[in-house]
Amino acid sequence: MKTVKHKILVLSGKGGVGKSTLSAHLAHGLAEDENTQVALLDIDICGPSVPKIMGLEGEQVHQSGSGWSPVYVEDNLGVMSVGFLLSSPDDAVIWRGPRKNGMIKQFLRDVDWGEVDYLIVDTPPGTSDEHLSVVQYLSAANIDGVVIVTTPQEVSLQDVRKEINFCHKVKLPLIGVVENMSSFVCPRCKKESQIFPPTTGGAEAMCQDLQIPLLGRVPLDPQIGKSCDKGQSFLTDAPDSPATLAYRSIIQRVRAFCHRHPSHEEEQRSTS
Amino acid sequence: MEEVPQECPGTGSAQAGRGASCQGCPNQRLCASGAGAAPDPAIEEIKEKMKTVKHKILVLSGKGGVGKSTLSAHLAHGLAEDENTQVALLDIDICGPSVPKIMGLEGEQVHQSGSGWSPVYVEDNLGVMSVGFLLSSPDDAVIWRGPRKNGMIKQFLRDVDWGEVDYLIVDTPPGTSDEHLSVVQYLSAANIDGVVIVTTPQEVSLQDVRKEINFCHKVKLPLIGVVENMSSFVCPRCKKESQIFPPTTGGAEAMCQDLQIPLLGRVPLDPQIGVRAFCHRHPSHEEEQRSTS
């Protein structure tokens, strides 16, 4: 990990809130600067969504003398996922915890990322093997921070508070919270509806309560689902969507966090 | 056998007790002796326990956030509307147990008696069990690796005193991992009637759901069918129907035709699904006044 400047985990206690969507678009957004090297690592072993969202289905991983080669979307954006190791995208990976842990160790130890500015790690929902393992294996390598993803309803926030609790227990710095699926604007009459009503005040109230930054609120836009299914960047498919503007602001805040908190590697370099 | 090394080869493996990662494991001698490969006695105990449970239904999805717990809860409510039908709802999502909240049972605790753990009753004929009832606070994270989660699931199946039950509905977390393998293994002698698979319309969900269906075939679980949630949204003002999660590859309907599995139904998005469940269990001051006057 010495060649990786910044490491960001994307977590949520809850499934289906848009972790992989955010991870992918964080990667796309950071990689828009050709001089920024970005790596996206998908450690969701049972439900690896990243290959599809990045338009890399069917790609395979190659081995070389220096390790496993990531799959490149762009010259400066490489991706790794268990999805690339399956014969077919419908193959179920039916592994218990210990075997998943072994895979995550291999991803972190054996993938030849090269010089990377940002490594984004997409995770499955929960607070179990995958989460404990990635924190443990990166314990000497210094994780910059965590982005927590939620949706507005209390059923999600309840799981997300557990995830925040997990971050405190394992001493992970919190960059902040992203609230996805905040609202939906009817394309015909423009009425705004809250499909997942924030009965307890949504992420905003939770963030105030726990003193954590709210990085942004992303509205529902059917184009997001379409772009993800097609493996295209929503940021380029719908540049004027309010959701794109929200994502861009979030990406900027993540970038700013990393620059305000130089990594251990950067500090070493600046003192040498 | 709760604490195992992270690269444990598996107690049933030929390498059990002999692999490099077995060094230092407290169970190494047990595995090396071949005892680890013997069937878990709990399986027979659970078979006995399940003799009072007529029908067992698992609710699965490869994908998170598609509405498994919502469906499980409403399946339970719907079946229990007949007072003569005894219904049990078991939540085996150890990390993210949503069922207590959805059933309006937050803060409830589990009681132990001579005949085992007592479920928490929503109605006389609807009992619920979840790890959520064992936490001091709903925000407490359950940060357990697979083996410890498996132990909890075994206890739920073996030690909960469900009594005579017509339907046991088991809500699961997303994925195809420890919880899923364990519930199938522990119920292997007790006969699971079938599985309801939940999805949403977009391909990113269907991809994970096909894996789950693949899992069901591998472990020989009968499929009752597929439910597609969040199918569409009707604007409350102008009534325009929008597909918020577009079925770019034909949605659950196309997948079900392709895999020859029944499509049980398509449920539209309705914000009330989230609000009503909350309000029903939190009667307003006025409602409480009315009911006591």
Image (spheres, coloured by chain):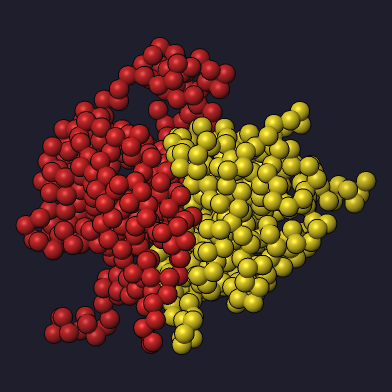
Chain colours: A yellow, B red
Q: The N terminus of chain A is located in which quarter?
A: top right
Q: Position of residue A269 (x, y in %)?
A: 88, 48
Q: Is residue B261 left or right of residue A120?
A: left
Q: Position of residue B90 (x, y in %)?
A: 27, 49
Residue furthest to the top:
B33
Q: Residue at x 20, y 36 (%)?
A: B191
Q: Is residue A73 left or right of residue A84?
A: right
Give the total number of marks visible in the rendering: 0
Which quadrant holds residue B150? top left
Q: Position of residue A77 (x, y in %)?
A: 72, 51
Q: Residue at x 25, y 41 (%)?
A: B222
Q: Residue at x 73, y 60 (%)?
A: A30
Residue A241 in view here: yes
Foreground residue, A179 or A192? Answer: A192
Which quadrant holds residue B33? top left
Foreground residue, A267 or B188? Answer: B188
Residue A149 in view here: no
Q: Position of residue B30 (x, y in %)?
A: 41, 17
The vertical placement of A103 against B241, above or below, is above
The vertical placement of B264 against A237, above or below, is above
Which quadrant holds residue B244? bottom left
Residue furthest to the right:
A272
